[in-house]
Image (cartoon, rainbow, N blue to C red):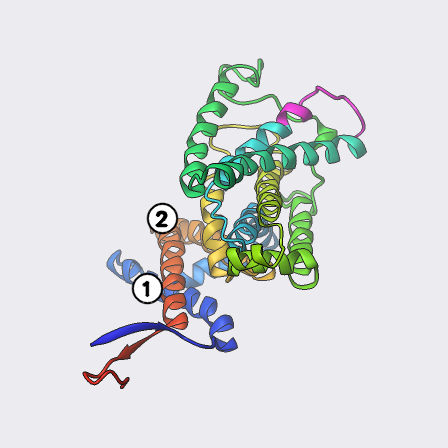
């Protein structure tokens, strides 16, 4: 007879090595469909590396792709640490983007020194509201936040389509469902000439550093850890659990909304229904691959962005489908989940006399 038991201690090598092993194993497993497609494996991976690190343009594209993933990864990380399962970062991203174009397309024709912070604030505020609502429903009525955040994603996207065909529609867009462009002074400044990388990347790195400091060094971070470890014990210890959940929900939603702001005000300049290719959902993979570490989120986001950008380059060079990137990301998440289970639990064989073998 066997039984699954929790391990008493978790080695630091497991904590640090699990994400690395998961990423390497995902790349190794991805070689199987490459081989089936008839592409030389080593040459394919070489083209992937060249597509990410082969030029200044390639590096800037990778950093540009990583920027919204850092924001959504941080959004998932903070919420998940409190056992608040925010699956709605995709919808919150679009809420932030809608707020950005609502404010930045000419409602306030003011200096960029005022307009850019105003756009960021509005995007964060509306994104925060998109997560505070499910958190409030969870606290007051016991509603499952996984269900409510997931449903809100669909509701928000449908609402977005209505807005792009109505109040936000660009009258000069030749009938195309897109918003009016954000004013030039409302755009985030670029970091490199003739490159798409913008100041949103610096904001993302700053947010990750602040999140790491708050979780490790602040009383708020300790309270959040206590709530996530054992909500009942935290309540008996006098920690305001409900207040902590609302606070982390607001911060999580604000970070997801900031991802939408960075894509609209930093990259495209206007809003369309296909702004995000799933950044909100990929942010969950980023958070899990990072082990819910804010600094790890940056590394994880860079890895996943490299996979996507490199896969596009490999697809053009080798004639292989770029959907291989989705396979690598999904496999990495699966490896993280399996590795996390193995690291936290052990299988114990129980003898007939009741002793352990």
> From the viewer's perspective, is residue 15 above or below residue 102?
below
Q: Quadrant of the C terminus?
A: bottom left
Provide the residue span drawn in magenta: 101-111
> From the viewer's perspective, is residue 87 above or below residue 291?
above
Between marks 2 and 1, how big is the CA–CA gap? 14 Å
Q: Which residue is mark 1?
A: 29
Q: Quadrant of the N terminus?
A: bottom left
* Viewer can see residue 30: yes
Q: Earlier in the sequence, mark 2 or mark 1?
A: 1
SS at mark 1 in the image: helix
Of the pair 70 and 132, the residue shown nearer to us = 132
Residue 184 located left or right of residue 33: right
Task: Indicate the quadrant where residue 154 lies.
Answer: top left
> From the viewer's perspective, is residue 214 above or below residue 127?
below
Residue 309 located left or right of residue 226: left
> From the viewer's perspective, is residue 40 above or below residue 159?
below
Kindly check if marks 2 and 1 are in contact, taking CB atoms under 8 A apart as contact: no
Residue 33 located left or right of residue 154: left
Judge whether residue 170 is colored magenta: no
Q: Which residue is mark 2?
A: 323
């Amino acid at each position: 007879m066997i039984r699954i038991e929790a391990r008493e201690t978790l080695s630091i090598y497991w904590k640090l090595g699990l994400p690395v092993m998961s990423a390497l194993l995902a790349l190794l497993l991805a070689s199987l469909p490459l081989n089936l497609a008839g592409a030389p494996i080593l040459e394919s991976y070489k083209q992937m590396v060249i597509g990410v690190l082969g030029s200044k343009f390639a590096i800037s594209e990778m950093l540009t792709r990583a920027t919204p993933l850092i924001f959504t990864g941080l959004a998932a990380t903070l919420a998940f640490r409190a056992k608040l399962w925010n699956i709605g970062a995709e919808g919150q991203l679009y809420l932030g983007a809608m707020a950005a174009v609502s404010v930045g397309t000419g409602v306030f024709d003011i200096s960029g020194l005022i307009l850019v912070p105003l756009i960021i604030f509005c995007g964060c505020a509306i994104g925060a509201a998109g997560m505070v609502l499910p958190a409030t429903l969870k606290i007051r009525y016991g509603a499952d936040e996984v269900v409510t955040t997931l449903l809100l994603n669909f509701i928000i996207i449908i609402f977005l389509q209505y807005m792009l065909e109505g109040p936000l529609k660009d009258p000069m867009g030749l009938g195309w469902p897109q918003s009016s462009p954000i004013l030039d002074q409302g755009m985030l400044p670029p970091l490199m000439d003739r490159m798409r990388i913008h100041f949103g990347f610096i904001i993302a790195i700053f947010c990750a550093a602040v999140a790491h400091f708050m979780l490790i060094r602040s009383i708020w971070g300790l309270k959040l850890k206590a709530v996530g470890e054992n909500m009942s014990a935290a309540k008996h210890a006098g920690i305001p659990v409900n207040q902590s959940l609302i606070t982390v929900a607001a911060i999580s939603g604000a970070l997801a909304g900031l991802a939408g702001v960075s894509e609209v005000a930093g990259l495209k300049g206007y809003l369309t229904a296909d702004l995000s290719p799933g950044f909100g959902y990929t942010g969950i993979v980023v958070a899990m691959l990072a082990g819910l570490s804010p600094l790890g989120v940056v590394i994880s986001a860079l890895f996943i962005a490299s996979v996507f950008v490199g896969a596009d380059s490999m697809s053009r060079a080798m004639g292989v489908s770029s959907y291989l990137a989705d396979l690598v990301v999904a496999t990495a998440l699966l490896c993280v989940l399996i590795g996390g289970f193995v690291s936290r639990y052990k299988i114990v064989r129980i003898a007939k006399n009741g002793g352990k073998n």
